[in-house]
Image (cartoon, rainbow, N blue to C red):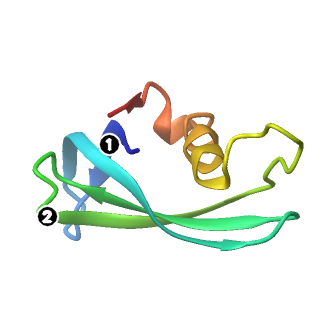
């Protein structure tokens, strides 16, 4: 699973850059039932160039029938402003 998103960022020189239709995948997950930390790699659409890596945290559901923690991490991302409008891919 991954999500597709467009980001408006600044490069190292302070210039605005649009990263259109990036491929965002969870690359690392650590934690437990009280708090999960995870990293997201933001790559180009061909998945051969890493633009940036971001870190996030959330409290997972451990209820019977809950989605696995990686699926929950993707769902958490889609609740954040910077991933507003992100699509599954």
Q: Residues within 10 Å of mark 1 (few under 14, many from 20)?
A: some
Identified at 48% across, 37% down, the residue is 83
In which quarter of the view is residue 33 placed? bottom right
Report whether 43 appears left or right of 66.
Answer: left
Image location (x, y in percent) of residue 3: 38, 39
Is tag 1's residue or tag 2's residue first in the polypeptide sequence?
1
Q: Secondary structure at mark 1?
A: strand
Identified at 83% across, 47% down, the residue is 61
Residue 75 to residue 48: above or below: above
12 or 82: nearer the eye?
82
Identified at 22% across, 48% down, the residue is 16
12 or 60: nearer the eye?
60
Image location (x, y in percent) of residue 23: 27, 47
* Residue receiving disc 2: 49
Report whether 37 appears left or right of 48.
Answer: right
Q: Secondary structure at mark 2?
A: loop
- Most distant residue in the top direction: 85
Identified at 72% across, 65% down, the residue is 36
* Residue receiving disc 1: 7
Report whether 5 appears left or right of 64.
Answer: left
Q: Which mark is residue 46?
A: none
Q: CA distance from mark 1 to mark 2?
A: 15 Å
In which quarter of the view is residue 69 placed? bottom right
Please state which of the two labelled residues, at mark 1 or mark 2, is closer to the viewer.
2
16 or 7: nearer the eye?
7
Image location (x, y in percent) of residue 89: 32, 34
């Amino acid at each position: 699973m991954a999500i597709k998103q467009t980001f408006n960022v600044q490069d190292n020189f302070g210039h605005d850059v649009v990263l259109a239709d990036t491929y965002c995948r969870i690359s690392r997950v650590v934690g437990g039932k009280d708090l999960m930390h995870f990293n997201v790699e933001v790559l180009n659409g061909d998945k051969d160039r890493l633009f940036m890596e971001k870190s996030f945290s959330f409290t997972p559901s451990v209820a019977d029938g809950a989605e696995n923690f990686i699926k929950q991490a993707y769902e958490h991302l889609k609740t954040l402003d910077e991933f507003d409008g992100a699509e599954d891919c």
